[in-house]
């Protein structure tokens, strides 16, 4: 389909031809199932766009053309174990002086389950709040201004684990605020932290896993809480 796109009109693409394209994508070796699904979805979206504007554009559907998942994505990616999380946080702790944003974005992902994009949108002047009734600090996630959220359910309040408070996250936010930063993290710089995760503690992390920010996010919730219940807590306040 794509190979002949330069010589064929959009109107000449039929559902059966698009189905063959999807079958070829699914049969290709190398790309992950999610990547294949994205290619098929993108093609379908393009034809829907054409159909909304041109009378002779074909009605193309992607229904039943994508590979059906055999397991939840979180199972395919694999979450970190408690020991692996501890190894990552131990290594990240070494960065808190020379690259504090890398330490804090790693710790916050582990203990909050927030998306990287959400963390990078946080405004140190406005998005850290204290709930007067409970006494808990939280980040306000919203789509106001230039912020965006994935879904309406993405508007929420994310409480900060007491271990993060003890470790000094409030001081980090206050420091960014005093420096006049518009965002809590230098977002382009945080992307480099992703490349450090696979090599941050190679002997302790299973080579079968794909270490990334997303893996950290999916390793949060009860695992991070359970880890912090241990006496040898990794995230500690600086001496």
Image: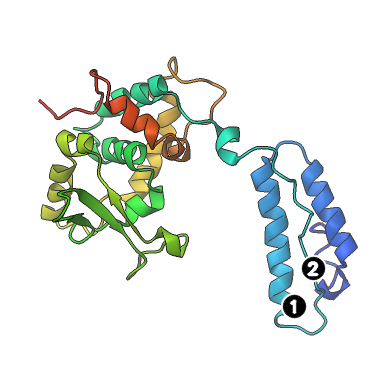
The answer to which of 52 and 150 lies nearer the viewer is: 150
- The quadrant the N terminus occupies is bottom right
Q: Say what secondary structure mark 1 lies in.
A: helix
The residue tagged 1 is 51
Counting other residues with Cα less than 10 Å from the Cα at mark 1, is it few (<14), some (14-19), or many (20 or more)? some
- 197 with respect to 63 (left or right): left
Q: Say what secondary structure mark 2 lies in.
A: loop
Q: How many marks?
A: 2
- 188 with respect to 37 (left or right): left
Question: What colour-coding does the image apply?
Answer: rainbow
Res 144 → quadrant: bottom left
- Residue 186: x and y, percent? 29, 50
- Residue 201: x and y, percent? 39, 20
Disc marking residue 117: none
Res 112 → quadrant: top left
Q: Tell me: residue 224, above or below residue 18.
A: above
Residue occupying the point 27% across, 48% down: 159
Q: Tell me: residue 153, above or below residue 90.
A: below
Res 183 → quadrant: bottom left
Q: Tell me: residue 185, above or below residue 53.
A: above
The answer to which of 144 and 75 lies nearer the viewer is: 75
Residue occupying the point 71% across, 83% down: 53
Counting other residues with Cα less than 10 Å from the Cα at mark 2, is it few (<14), some (14-19), or many (20 or more)? many
Answer whether labels 1 and 2 touch (C-beta < 8 Å): yes
Residue occupying the point 60% across, 34% down: 76
The residue tagged 2 is 60
- Residue 204: x and y, percent? 43, 16
């Amino acid at each position: 389909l794509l190979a002949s796109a330069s010589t064929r009109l959009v109107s000449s693409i039929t559902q059966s031809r698009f189905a063959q394209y999807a079958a070829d994508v699914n049969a290709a070796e190398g790309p992950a199932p999610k990547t294949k699904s994205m290619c098929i979805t993108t093609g379908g979206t393009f034809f829907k766009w054409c159909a909304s504007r041109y009378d002779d554009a074909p009605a193309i559907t992607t229904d039943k053309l994508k590979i059906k998942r055999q397991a939840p994505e979180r199972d395919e990616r694999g979450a970190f174990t408690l020991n692996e999380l501890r190894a990552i946080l131990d290594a990240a702790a070494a960065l808190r002086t020379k690259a504090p944003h890398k330490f804090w974005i790693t710790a916050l992902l582990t203990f909050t389950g927030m998306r990287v994009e959400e963390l990078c949108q946080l405004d140190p002047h406005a998005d850290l709040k204290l709930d007067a009734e409970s006494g808990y600090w939280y980040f306000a996630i919203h789509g106001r201004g230039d912020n965006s959220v994935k879904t309406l359910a993405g508007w929420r309040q994310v409480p900060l684990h007491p271990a993060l408070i003890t470790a000094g996250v409030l001081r980090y936010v206050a420091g960014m605020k005093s420096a006049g930063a518009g965002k809590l993290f230098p977002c382009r710089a945080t992307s480099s932290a992703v490349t450090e995760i696979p090599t941050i503690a190679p002997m302790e992390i299973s080579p079968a896993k794909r270490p990334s920010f997303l893996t950290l996010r999916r390793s949060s919730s009860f695992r991070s809480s359970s880890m912090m219940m241990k006496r040898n807590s990794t995230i500690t306040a600086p001496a």
